[in-house]
Amino acid sequence: MLGMVGPTMQARSKLLVVSNRGPINFVRADDGSVQARRGAGGLIVTLGPGAQRDGALWLAAATTAAEREGGSEGPVSSGGFNYLPVAIEPDDYRAYYDVVANQTLWFCLHGLWDHPRRPRFDRHWWEAWGRYRAANEAFAMAVCEAAGPDAAVLVQDYQLALVPALVKARRPDIGLSTFLHTPWCSPQELRTLPDEVRVEVLSGLAGGGPVGFHTSRWAEAFAACCHEELGHPVETFVAPAGTDRDDLTGVAGSDACGRALQELDEVVGDRQLIVRVDRIEPSKNVLRGFWAFDELLESRPDLRGRVVFAAMVYPSRVGLSEYQAYGQEVLSLADRVNEKWATPGWTPVLVDPADDYPRSVAALRRYDVLLVNPVRDGMNLVAKEGPLVNQRDGTLVLSHEAGAWAELSEHAFGVNPFDVTHTAAALEQALEAPADDRRRRAAGLKVAAGAITPLDWFDRLLEQARRAHPAGESAG
Ligand code: F6P
């Protein structure tokens, strides 16, 4: 249901959440009217429960005509969220989101550069940087206008790196914390960015209040970059995110998930099942996962016909050429592995590129081994979601480079994500772990994965924002 909250509430907002992607999408219905739908993506899972509980005003980018129209009269209330779209013209959005946030900052933070070719800071890039700055200005203005006196503001992620300092400079009365869902890179890797850009990004993030990360590793890397570039210490905090167990068990118990599980069971039969659930995203390391499976089938002929690898990999950031090319490589590698090993009645690799959450949860219920092998990842909630719904004492093969490693390492089979042979060996060990070891690991994973709820996490961010308020904890 879509309803207008109205400008009075906007003026009185005591708590604001600010992110690029919002909790609501606006779509145009057949009759031409604009309707609100719950948004997709990981951020809503993590931030949603706290924003709903506390009635936060959530500011996010409106880029399509329908989105701009939907929010043209002020905040909108829908599905338990109060949402205020920040209008950004489509061309500006492409420069801000595609070129600077995703092709540059994302690649830098995840260590994904292809150094002989990328990055390339040419005049087109510098023009995009100007638009990134303007989009961050637009967000900061919207925050300053919507925040009531002494409000708490929770800024999310690298798309909005300049917002914290811009807000704080104009509204010192606000208590603000910033959270990065990404990893952070070393000072040496950050030096790929032009001098003025890295100083502006670091001072933009650190200039508004404490900056949080999912693990101490990323927080320490950020502090080291600030020390080197800004020459002074900055305030950081560590708050690992949790997943919404109730929401997940609700989906796991749904008819759609039950049907998907039945379909999967029919295909897999009594074979063992390796599963991965990921956006098609270079940092997720989908290719090395397939290479490792190929190497396992090569070295263990007896496993041929006895194991299936289901890759639930769904499209992401499809406007970017790097993502399109990577998606093509993923599909063609899966085809090559199948051409090499398939027999009548056995398809070794199943690729499901549909963004269908109940189907992904069905695969998580059914896996014997869950593969989470990102080259670098802020947290990776799949590593937590899997153990919470899995019904088979499934084991977890987990990259040392995922933020989740800090909490789950004791119960997982760890891998260096670049080492294909080691990943093949870890898959082998995880498939063949004895029943009592599987049981012990699965029980440990369930406890560790469910230890922090999204509300616990939201409270940590809020506490940091209030602590950063000039009047301390008494604010808000
Ligand atoms: O991990 C960083 C992040 O921005 C998350 O907050 C989000 O869920 C994910 O990447 C996907 O981002 P996008 O909104 O670009 O699809």
Image: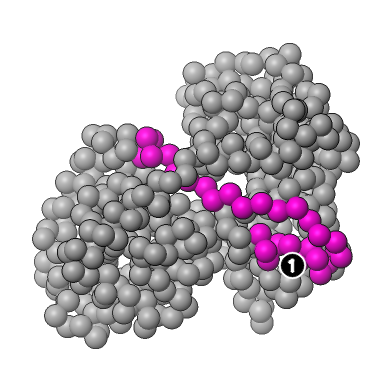
| Residue 124: quarter of image | bottom right
**Residue 462, percent from left and from top:** 65, 36
Crowding near pointer 1: few (<14 within 10 Å), some, many (20+)?
some
Q: Is residue 279 left or right of residue 76?
A: left
Point 64% across, 16% down: residue: 5
**Residue 91, percent from left and from top:** 72, 47
In reply to whether residue 233 is colored magenta, the answer given is: yes
Point 23% across, 45% down: residue: 260
Q: Is residue 80 above or below residue 195?
A: above
Q: Is residue 25 left or right of residue 198?
A: left
Point 76% across, 72% down: residue: 191
Judged from the image, the secondary structure of the residue bearing numbered disc 1 is: helix
* Magenta region: 219-248
Residue most toward the bottom?
299
Q: Amino acid at mark 1?
A: Ala
Q: Is residue 407 above or below residue 306?
A: above
In terms of depth relative to the viewer, which is nearer, 34 or 260? 260
In terms of depth relative to the viewer, which is nearer, 198 or 53? 53
In reply to whether residue 261 is colored magenta, the answer given is: no
* Residue 312 visible at all: no
In terms of depth relative to the viewer, which is nearer, 90 or 80? 80
Q: Is residue 323 left or right of residue 425?
A: right
Q: How many marks?
A: 1
**Residue 251, percent from left and from top:** 32, 37
Give the residue pinned by disc 1.
Answer: 224
Point 14% across, 72% down: residue: 305
Q: Which quadrant does the C terminus fall into?
A: top right
In terms of depth relative to the viewer, which is nearer, 173 or 198? 173
**Residue 225, percent from left and from top:** 76, 66
